[in-house]
Image (cartoon, coloured by chain):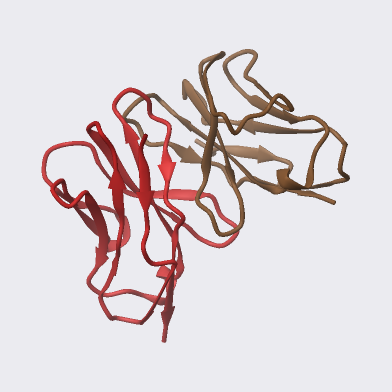
Chain colours: A red, B brown
Amino acid sequence: AQSVTQLDSQVPVFEEAPVELRCNYSSSVSVYLFWYVQYPNQGLQLLLKYLSGSTLVKGINGFEAEFNKSQTSFHLRKPSVHISDTAEYFCAVSDRSTDKLIFGTGTRLQVFP
Amino acid sequence: DTGVSQDPRHKITKRGQNVTFRCDPISEHNRLYWYRQTLGQGPEFLTYFQNEAQLEKSRLLSDRFSAERPKGSFSTLEIQRTEQGDSAMYLCASSYGVLYEQYFGPGTRLTVT
């Protein structure tokens, strides 16, 4: 069975500082990896995804993530955050036989001025 | 493309009552998914459809839950004899298929009193 662990439930950071949101997954088969963002009172929005190929994936809003197979990680990074990045971020995994998503518990990113 | 819509956005019901939620996917999306999100948790997969066929159901989906997608377009999720533990946000998503992005609706928040 697959699972996703987001080690940090909350990450406070000041505006314009860099940030890394950590995600580790567990799976016995090859997986696809995703990061979604959820703004207050809005639906989930895809930030980026890793399907295959280059391990460094660039997404929307200046976010990027790196797939590390040996460490089973898919950490999300942004070099300089904005107030508007304040939201809940979810890491998710799916396997190649079904595209249902298995989500982590989420990390709340709080950006302070 | 008006996005995935869900109706109602909020539902308050008394324990023991039946409720039905509706999801309208993005037109031409073949796949439709239902997830449930409780406070402080990531979304959990419930079930999904390929056109009108229900392909997979999670063990989370007890006998009190039923989902349909009669004509391969909109879908309904019914909960019979609601319990307080059913209180959650019910999310719907749609996609063209495997490897394609799942687009999420805003969700229906259910409160069972």
Say whether residue B10 is visible: no
Q: Residue at x 29, y 81 (%)?
A: A16
Q: How many marks?
A: 0
Q: Residue at x 36, y 54 (%)?
A: A5
B82 left or right of A7 in image: right
The answer to whether A2 is drawn above or below residue A11 in the figure is above
Q: Residue furthest bottom?
A: A113
Q: To which quarter of the image does residue B76 belong?
A: top right
Q: Residue A60: percent from the left, percent from the top?
A: 30, 55
The answer to whether B8 is drawn above or below residue B20 in the figure is below
Q: Nearer the viewer, residue A18 or B27?
A: A18
Q: Residue A59: percent from the left, percent from the top?
A: 27, 53
Q: Residue A50: percent from the left, percent from the top?
A: 23, 42
Q: Residue at x 53, y 50 (%)?
A: A43
Q: Residue B42: percent from the left, percent from the top?
A: 50, 51
A16 left or right of B40 in image: left
- Figure quadrant of the C terminus of chain A: bottom left
Say whether residue A22 is visible: yes
- Figure quadrant of the N terminus of chain A: top left
